[in-house]
Image (cartoon, rainbow, N blue to C red):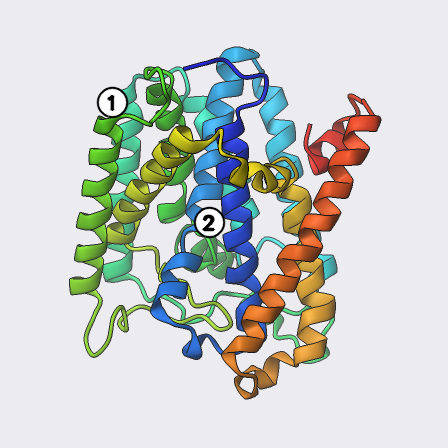
Amino acid sequence: MSTFKRDSSIDIIRGIAIVIMLGANVVGYVTSCELHPLWFDIYSSLAAPMFILLSGYMVAINSSKKHKSLNYYLLRAGMIMLTAAIIDGLIWQLLPFASFDVLYVIGLGMLVVFLLEKSHLTVKFGFIAAVLLISFLLQHTWEYMEFPLEIEFLSGEADYSAYSFFNVIKAWLYDGWFPVFPWIAFPVLGSIFAHFRKQYTNGFAEIKPVLYGAALTIAGFAWLYFAYTEGYAFDLLVKREPYGEIFYPATVPFMIATFGVCLLVFAFIDKTRESIVWKPLTIFGQTSLFNYILHTGIIAYIVTPVFNFEEVGLHPLYMGWIVYGLLVLVSYIFSYGVTLIKRKVKTRNFLFNFYFGG
């Protein structure tokens, strides 16, 4: 595979994940997730797996090429978790380190990947298998909360009794938004992707990765459908308003299916990355953390008050699509502005590069 100063495929895939994320996170604040079509629930469920997998992929690539130390990843992981805590506290006005949102598992995953990076591939595959097995056992033996632990610390009616050590650990391990089991498997899978992708001349744009990806995707979604469907597709899974994703909880078949989807996305982008149609997505891909923070603030301080989350069922679905489109447009304008600033301001400042993309 050709050597790039910056891997365009990774920026494109990250950009795809951002566009999906914007819709997954905003549409439910405009119209009830009960009204969302099934295809959108499945589509929305793909952003988080890609994001978390890419975080592990980049740790594997950077640690091998740039010989980064444990202290470097302790700092970056700590900053990711601190950012997650700030978002919880300042934007959502929730007590941090309780519901375990996606940035927490990304930060933890960076450390896990770094510690496993010198290990043999069988250790990594064994780690993923163990995570899936433990997840399966937890999901069949431990009560899964319909809504994760969240405490509005500025609310006069906040019930702090729920903020116990046991409940926090349970959220981290099992029933928060993105618990360790099974989500910690994705960054480790990302490091495995990094190992195999460099073995091919054209990345994953080869027949073997495509066949593996297709097999995993079909097998995973077929298993998920037949195991978690009673009256209509996937109705035995939990719906966590305002989100309609089909990973509450993230079951073993869901994990297998999205392992395959991620492989297929890599293969497709590696094959078509020179196409001009992907150019706008590289802007998103180069400013991913900035976009995550920006869209969270927009949802919390603009979308939620305007559409009144308590009355989302009163708004038609097309209104959700309109807001989704506007959020993509606004996010792109800000992201493009950031890239222009980065071209003019060449700096090694850690915080600047961390939040705006180095």
Q: Secondary structure at mark 1?
A: helix
Q: Amino acid at mark 2?
A: Ala
Residue 306: x and y in percent read 71, 78
Q: Which residue is mark 2?
A: 48
Judging depth in this view, the residue of 84 and 281 nearest the camera is: 281
Left or right of 162 in this view: 185: left
Which picture quadrant has residue 309?
Answer: bottom right
Q: Which residue is mark 1?
A: 122
Q: Secondary structure at mark 2?
A: helix
6 relative to 129, above or below: above
Residue 19: x and y in percent read 54, 51
Left or right of 2 in this view: 224: left
x 23%, y 28%: residue = 207
Q: Nearer the viewer, mark 2 or mark 1?
A: 2
Residue at the extreme right? 345
How packed mark 2 is, by other alpha carbons closer than 10 Å (few <14, some 14-19, many 20 or more), is: many
x 53%, y 83%: residue = 316
x 51%, y 25%: residue = 59
Q: Amino acid at mark 1?
A: Thr
Figure quadrant of the N terminus: top left
Question: In the rendered structure, which disc, 2 or 1, sits on the residue that comes first in sequence?
Answer: 2
Left or right of 194 in this view: 90: right
Which picture quadrant has residue 26?
Answer: bottom right
Q: Which mark is residue 114?
A: none
Is residue 248 at least partly visible in the picture? no
Is residue 11 at least partly visible in the picture? yes
